[in-house]
Amino acid sequence: MQRNAPTPVVMTLSSHDPSGCVGIQADIETSISLGCHCTPIVTALCARDTRDIKDVIAVDTGFLIEQSRAILEDMPVKAIKLDYLANVRQVEAVHTILRDYPNIPVVLNPARSIANMASREGSAVLEAAKHLLFPATTLLCPDIVEAHQIAQQGDTIDACAQEILEAGGDHLLISGTHRCQKSYENSLYNSQGLVRRYTWERLSVFSHGGGATLSASIACYLGHGLLLRDAVQQGQNFAWHSLAASRRLGMGHGVPNRLFWADRNTDGGRSRGSGGGC
């Protein structure tokens, strides 16, 4: 990244989470930390704390479109990150927007982030996303639980990956495909199958917001012009350090510290991931 290079603009679509664990604040913090300018598009307002969600109010679909197009018609957006979408109408709206900007890389954090799967409309939102959004994505970033929610016919991790990519999308990064006491693996796939496994030290802290941080950081690195595999590697490294430096600010989960490198109380320079090939 050149010091005098233009600041990449990364547009993110997600909810407003007042706890700061996930949602728009997570995207803004990640973008600032990685030298990008975030243009946050709010999809819903959440009442939640560090333990759970109390209530969600969806933003009007017309206003969601107005927010998005105002930015896309004004700024040179280098990457788009999609996260929480509240209903099918929002999915359809985002589909029309992406169709008009096919050359912008899209990172999608799906399933539990796309919709509240416990809600009546959750399954319908996921199905709409599979048909309308997955084909437009550069990278899908589910964790292993989300992957099984999306690909319910897959009896193995590789089968889940194949089923998801058959719905569309260029690449798929599944987090937590293998776990042991000291480490865990993330697996990158494309239409040909497994591309690479990445091994990381397992953390003892339990934080909420790892998926949001990972997908946002990969979008930022793509915005800087990195190749996808390099963006995936660097994004995982950033997310690991953010989670390792998590702070317990409330009575529930820890909050990732996405500005860990500026915190004198953390060791921002350490790296515990091997990124080993398969």
Image (cartoon, grey):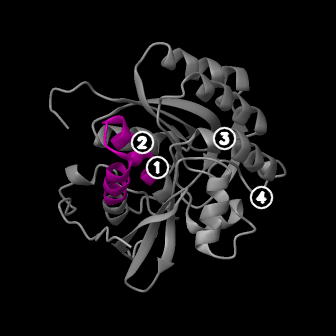
- Residue 27, image x, y percentages: 44, 41
> From what the image shows, is residue 77 above or below residue 54?
above
CB atoms of marks 1 and 2 within 8 Å: yes
CB atoms of marks 3 and 2 within 8 Å: no
For disc 2, the marked residue is: 219
Within 10 Å of disc 4 (Cα), the crowding (few <14, some 14-19, many 20+) is few
For disc 3, the marked residue is: 85
Q: Amino acid at mark 2?
A: Ala
For disc 4, the marked residue is: 118
Asked where in the image residue 272 lies, by quadrant, the reply is bottom left
Within 10 Å of disc 2 (Cα), the crowding (few <14, some 14-19, many 20+) is many
Q: Secondary structure at mark 1?
A: helix
Within 10 Å of disc 1 (Cα), the crowding (few <14, some 14-19, many 20+) is many
For disc 1, the marked residue is: 215
Query: Which residue is found at the position 59% from the left and 29% from the top?
Result: 98
Q: Mark 3 or mark 4: which comes first in sequence?
A: 3
CB atoms of marks 1 and 3 within 8 Å: no
Magenta segment, which residues?
A: 213-238
- Nearer the observer, disc 3 or disc 2? 2
Q: Mark 1 or mark 3: which comes first in sequence?
A: 3
Q: Secondary structure at mark 2?
A: helix
The answer, for residue 146, to whether it is visible in the render is: no
The tag on residue 230 is: none
